[in-house]
Structures are given as C-alpha cells and as structure tokens.
Amino acid sequence: MSSSSNSKQAMWVAIGQFCAYAIGIVSPMILSRYFDKGDYGTYKQVMYVYSTLTTVFTFGIPRAYSYFIPRVTLGESRDVVKKITNIFICLGIIFSILLFLGAPLIAQLLKNPDLAIALKYFAPTPLFLMPVVGLDCILASYKKTQFLAIYSISTKVFTLICIVLPVILFKGTYVHAIIGFDIASFITFLLALYLRNIPTKGIPIEKTTVTIRDILRFSIPLMIASIWIMIFQSANQFFVSRYYGNETFADFSNGFIEFPIIPMVVNSVATVLMPVFSGMMVNNREGIKDVWTRALSKSVKITYPMAVFSIVFSSLIMICFYGDIYQTSGIYFLIKNVEGFFAIIPFYPILLALGKTKAYSNIHMAMAVAIVPLEFLVVMIGLPAAMIGVVYVLCSFIKVVLQFLIVSKSVQLSFRDLIPYKDMIMVAVVAGLSTIFPYLFAAHHSEINKFVLLMLSVLFFVVCYYALCWLAKITYRDIAEGYLSKTRLSGVIRLIP
C-alpha cells in the first residue's frame, strides 16, 4: 500500500481518536460541576478500576486481529474474527462476575466504601464492551478505518448523553451516571458487532486453520508487556486514590492528562512509521535516519507549542474545563505535559520492526518495578500528591532514554543522528517566548470571564508564535503542502511560515 494511502488510514485513526478524546473529556467537565468532589472522585475511581482491569483481561488478544487477518483469506478471516470475539465474550462474562463479587474488596483496597455499590452497578459494562475491544484492529486490517472514526464519534456522543442527561435533568447521582454508562455500553456492543462484519459482508465464512491455541500463543507475550505497561501507568492513580483520598484523586485524575493533540499525533506517526520501518529493515536501513528525523521534526513542530502553552496556562485551562474548585488540578496538568517534550519520540514502531519486542517488554518491566517503590516512598515520607506525578514523569523520561539506547545500538546511529535537537530547542524557545505577552495579559486581567480569558490567551499566543516563526525561520510548509498543495486551499501555503 502506498504511503499516501497509509497516511489517509492514519488520518482516520487520528480523527477518531481526537474526537473520542475531545468528547470523552466533556463528561468530566459536566459531572465535576454537578457532583461534589467526593462523589466525583468515586465516579473517577470506577473508571480507573475498569481501565486498569481491562488491560489485564484483554490478554494482549486485540493485536491478534492485526496479526492473523492479513495472513488468511477473507472467508477465513470471518472465522478468525468469530473465534477471537468468542474469547472476548467469555472474558467479558468472567470480568463482570469478578467485578461484581470483588467490589467490596476493591473498595476496601482503595479505602472508599461508596466504591463497592458503584462497581456493582458498573459490573454489566465489561460484558458488553469486552467483545468491542479490538474493533480498531479489525477495521485497520481491512483498511476500513473511516468506519472506525464514525464509530468512535457516534458511540462517544451517545455515551456522553446517557451519562450526563440523568444528572442534568433529574439531578441524578454518580450511580445514575454509571447506569447510563451501562446502557450506552450495550448500544456500543450492538453497533460494534454490525461494523465488524461490514468489510466481509457477502463473503461466505470459511473454516480457518488458525486455532484458539495459536491465538493465545501469539497473545501471551503481548499480554506480559501490557501488564507491565498497566502497572507503570496506573501505579500513580492507585497511590493517590488509596493514600490521598477520593477528593484528591478527583483533582489528580482531572489534571494528570495530556493535551489531546499530543497523543493523537504520536499514535498517528507510529501508525504510519511501523510498516515503513518494517520494509526499510530489509531493503534500506540507511534511509531510517531521514524518515525518523523528518517525522520527529514535524511532530515537534505540532506538539511542542501546545505543550508549552498547556504548561504556562495549566491552572486557567483546568478552571475552564472543570470549574474553580479544580484549580489545583492545574499543577498535575503542568507536570503531565512536561512529558510531552520527550514522549513524542516514536520508539514503539521501530522497536517492533527491529524485532525487539522482548527488550520493549523488559524496559517496561524495569520501569514498573522501579515506579512502585518510588511512589510508595513518596507516600511514606508524606510528600504532596504532586510528587507522585513528578516520579511518573521522571520514570517516563528514563524509559525513553533506555529505548533510545536500544534503537541507537541496533541501527548504529548516534543521538545527533536520531534526535533533531536543534529543531526541538528552537521550537520550545520560540513557543516559550510566545507565551510571555499572553501570560502578562492574563495576569493583569484576571477579573475577565475565564473562558474569554483563555480564548484571548490562545489568540495572542497564536499571533505571537506565528510572527516569531517567520523571524526564527521555523517552517510549517513541509507539513501543510502534503495536505493543501492539490486542493483549492493551495494558495494558503504561501502565508504559512
């Protein structure tokens, strides 16, 4: 498949992810204004428990779709999808039963008695959503990611309505929001079952030679890596939830998020680079440097300005998102977006292309083993919850360094060869300078409505950054030309630095 076609597939994935994230963040914005911090913290703990256990219960199986579907005929692929879906249905039943029966134990572990009732109401959701897991892999394997974008947007909008409507109209509690989530999950399940069959509609099903054992044999190594990643990513939420209370957890869970464009760009770049690197490992290893640095340079120019703005205006952004009582979430938002300066480097696709899956898993194992005692030490010393976030970001940085060392050694390229550090420094400095005037304006006009103040700050930042890009010769034309050169908007390119 051409790079252009791959780019379009990645674009659909990115659109779906961004819209899902944007819509998904609206429900916390609404609920945080209707619930007190305690109830909102309980609701967020339910989501935390579900997302953490989902990683364990998927067993790395979703990627089996991407591995096996391209290796069989279309008729056989229907049988593969059916087998994997049946596995997920069984896992969903087990997940729901354990969640219902284990609710009191989980509530005790996180020191929140209200969590037991909340989890019991939430227990049906895994039964509906587990078979949905991996739909993105199915549609991507058939090159039908446009349906994935439609699915992501429509289901997120419906879920949002089901969650917030009973709270707004009937002054419902977090229990009513959870019941709405259950209803939305059932509808999501029905839509996913329909969409998974669209690529092979009208094609007779053929019995495949791929067995359940083959699927599990492929999935287990990925499951091990996923568990380490889960421990690494969820440890901070566990310690904050258990030792700092559900109100602090509400502040933390709202704030410790990336600006949505950043993960969207990273995932899109990884989607495009993975097949490219796989081919280059065989035919053109020397060309890896140019492809890598071009992709990374473009990613930096998109994400760094947003990361810098998010850091400088973190408190204002959190107030606009969640209300005045969540101003303290700003410190967590600031800490998390520092990660955006180094977490954009696309190590995952090149490590898999190099066949370094074991090394990839070992790195996450090492960081998972390290982060748990370090964050526990923060708790025992009595440091504020913000230090939990600092430890996570430091460990994330070390993880990036370790991955870089493996890649550098494997492709025999140095730091200067692989990292466009001059571009990174220049964009970061220019973005930082561009925040000075908006920051001073916001500081001297704090009495203005916060939403208006944020919009004005964004406008002033964009104008300043645009002007400084011309002066510093930071160009964005290489990005814009790929999308605008053959359209009616091609004339706009000359206005871009």
Image: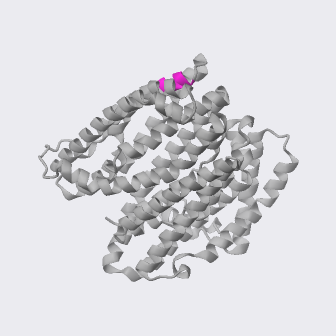
Question: Which residue appears farthest toward the front when viewing the image?
Answer: 380
Q: How is the image coloured?
A: one colour
The residue that appears at 45% across and 59% down in the rendered structure is: 365
Please say whether residue 488 is visible from this viewpoint: no
Nearest the eye: 143 or 378: 378
Q: Is residue 43 magenta?
A: no
Q: Which residues are magenta?
A: 174-179
Instruction: From the top left corner, tell me how far across and down residue 96 is, in percent.
Output: 37, 31
Q: In which quadrant of the rendered image does the N terminus lie?
A: bottom left
Residue 75 against residue 105 in the figure, above or below? below
Residue 146 against residue 474 in the figure, above or below? above
Question: Which residue appears farthest toward the right when viewing the image?
Answer: 444
Q: In which quadrant of the rendered image does the C terminus lie?
A: bottom right
The residue that appears at 35% across and 38% down in the rendered structure is: 130
Determine whether, in the image, residue 281 is placed left or right of residue 28: left
- Count numbered badges in the picture: 0
Nearest the eye: 405 or 26: 405
Determine whether, in the image, residue 74 is placed left or right of residue 455: left
Q: Is residue 177 magenta?
A: yes
The residue that appears at 52% across and 62% down in the rendered structure is: 484
Please say whether residue 341 is visible from this viewpoint: yes
Q: Looking at the rendering, which quadrant does residue 301 occupy?
A: bottom right
Instruction: From the top left corner, tell me how far across and down residue 359 is, in percent.
Output: 40, 67
Instruction: From the top left corner, tell me how far across and down residue 54 is, in percent.
Output: 41, 42
Nearest the eye: 466 or 297: 297
The residue that appears at 67% across and 37% down in the rendered structure is: 322
Instruction: From the top left corner, tell me how far across and down residue 220 is, in percent.
Output: 30, 54
Nearest the eye: 231 or 293: 231
Residue 433 against residue 36 in the figure, above or below? below
The kind of secondary structure the magenta stretch mainly shows is helix
Determine whether, in the image, residue 325 is placed left or right of residue 275: right
